[in-house]
Image: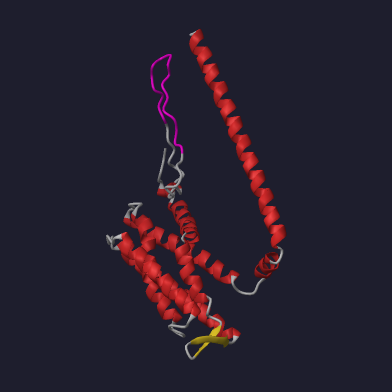
C-alpha cells in the first residue's frame, strides 16, 4: 500500500493506494514477483496534487475561514464614535475587501515559506492558540470596532500565524528541497484559489441571490434533507446487508473447498 507518492500525486495521508498484493502460489510454494509501475510520476502531478491539498486544507480548516470572513463582515460599514453605523460606498467596500484579502495572503505566504524552507521546528499548541485569539479579536471587532481602517494590517499580522499552521502539513511529508519549493507554490495556489472563490461568493451575484431565496423556503429544504437522509440510510443498510451475504457465501465456499481437499 502506497501512503505517499509525491510524484504520483498521492500526498494525502487520509487514503492509500494499492500497489499490488503479495500472494503465495500454494501449488509451487513460490511467491510471484510483484511489479510496481512508477513511470507515470512527474513534478506536474505532484504540483497539481498540492494545489488540491491546499484547497482542501482551507475548506476543512474552518478556523482560517472564520478569521478571514469575520474581518470581511464589517468591511462595508462605517465606524463612528466607537460603533458601526451606516455604510460606506461600494468602491470603498471593495477596496477594503481587496486589501484585507491580499494582506492575509501576504502574511501567511511569508510565514509558510519561511517556516517550511527554514525547517523551523515550532510547537503546534502556541500556533493554534494564536489562531484562536485572532478569531476572538476579529469577532469582537465585527461587533464593536477595535481597529477601524486597520483591518488589512491586522489581517497581515495574524496571517503570519495562520501560515505557520499551514506549514505543519508540509513538514509531515519530509519532501526534498525541490519538491518542497514546488509544493509551496502549489499548496499556496490552492489556498488562494479557494479563498478568492469564497470572497467572490460574498459579492452580489446570481449564486448569492439564489441562496438568499432558498433560505426563505425552510420547510421545503428541511423536507428535502429529511428525504435525502432517509434514502442514504436505506442505501447504506442495503449495501451492508449485501456485503455480509457476500462474505458469508465466500466463507461457505472456502470451507467446502477445504473439506474436498
In the picture shown, does residue 191 fall above or below 154?
above
Span colored in magenta: 18-34
Residue 188 is situated, as x and y percent measured from the top left of the image, at 44, 64
Magenta: main secondary structure equals loop
Q: Residue at x 55, y 22 (%)?
A: 250
Q: Along the line of sight, which residue is nearer the eye, 45 or 91?
A: 91
Is residue 164 highlighted in magenta?
Answer: no
In the picture shown, does residue 255 fall above or below 185?
above
Q: Residue at x 42, y 47 (%)?
A: 13
Task: Specify whether residue 232 is in view.
Answer: yes
Residue 43 is situated, as x and y percent measured from the top left of the image, at 43, 53
Going by the picture, which residue comes out furthest to the front?
219
Q: Residue at x 46, y 49 (%)?
A: 9
Residue 76 is situated, as x and y percent measured from the top left of the image, at 56, 82
Task: Specify whether residue 109 is in view.
Answer: no
Q: Along the line of sight, which residue is nearer the eye, 166 or 37?
A: 166
Amino acid at each position: 500500500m502506497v501512503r505517499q507518492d509525491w510524484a504520483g500525486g498521492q500526498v494525502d495521508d487520509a487514503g492509500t493506494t494499492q500497489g499490488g498484493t503479495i500472494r503465495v502460489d500454494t501449488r509451487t510454494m513460490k511467491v510471484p514477483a510483484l511489479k510496481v509501475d512508477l513511470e507515470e510520476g512527474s513534478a506536474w502531478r505532484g504540483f497539481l496534487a498540492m494545489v488540491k491539498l491546499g484547497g482542501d486544507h482551507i475548506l476543512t480548516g474552518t478556523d482560517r475561514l472564520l478569521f478571514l470572513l469575520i474581518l470581511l463582515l464589517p468591511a462595508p460599514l462605517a465606524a463612528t464614535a466607537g460603533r458601526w453605523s451606516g455604510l460606506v460606498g461600494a468602491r470603498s467596500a471593495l477596496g477594503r475587501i481587496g486589501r484585507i484579502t491580499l494582506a492575509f495572503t501576504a502574511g501567511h505566504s511569508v510565514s509558510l515559506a519561511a517556516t517550511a524552507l527554514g525547517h523551523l521546528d515550532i510547537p503546534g499548541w502556541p500556533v493554534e492558540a494564536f489562531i484562536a485569539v485572532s478569531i476572538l479579536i476579529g469577532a469582537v471587532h465585527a461587533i464593536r470596532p477595535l481597529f477601524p481602517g486597520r483591518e488589512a494590517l491586522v489581517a497581515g499580522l495574524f496571517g503570519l500565524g495562520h501560515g505557520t499552521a499551514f506549514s505543519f502539513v508540509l513538514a509531515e511529508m519530509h519532501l526534498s528541497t525541490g519538491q518542497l519549493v514546488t509544493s509551496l507554490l502549489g499548496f499556496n495556489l490552492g489556498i488562494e484559489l479557494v479563498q478568492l472563490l469564497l470572497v467572490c461568493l460574498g459579492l452580489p451575484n446570481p449564486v448569492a441571490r439564489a441562496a438568499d431565496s432558498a433560505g426563505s423556503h425552510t420547510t421545503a429544504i428541511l423536507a428535502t434533507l429529511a428525504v435525502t437522509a432517509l434514502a442514504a440510510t436505506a442505501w447504506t443498510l442495503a449495501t451492508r446487508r449485501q456485503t455480509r451475504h457476500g462474505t458469508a457465501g465466500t466463507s461457505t465456499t472456502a470451507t467446502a473447498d477445504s473439506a474436498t481437499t
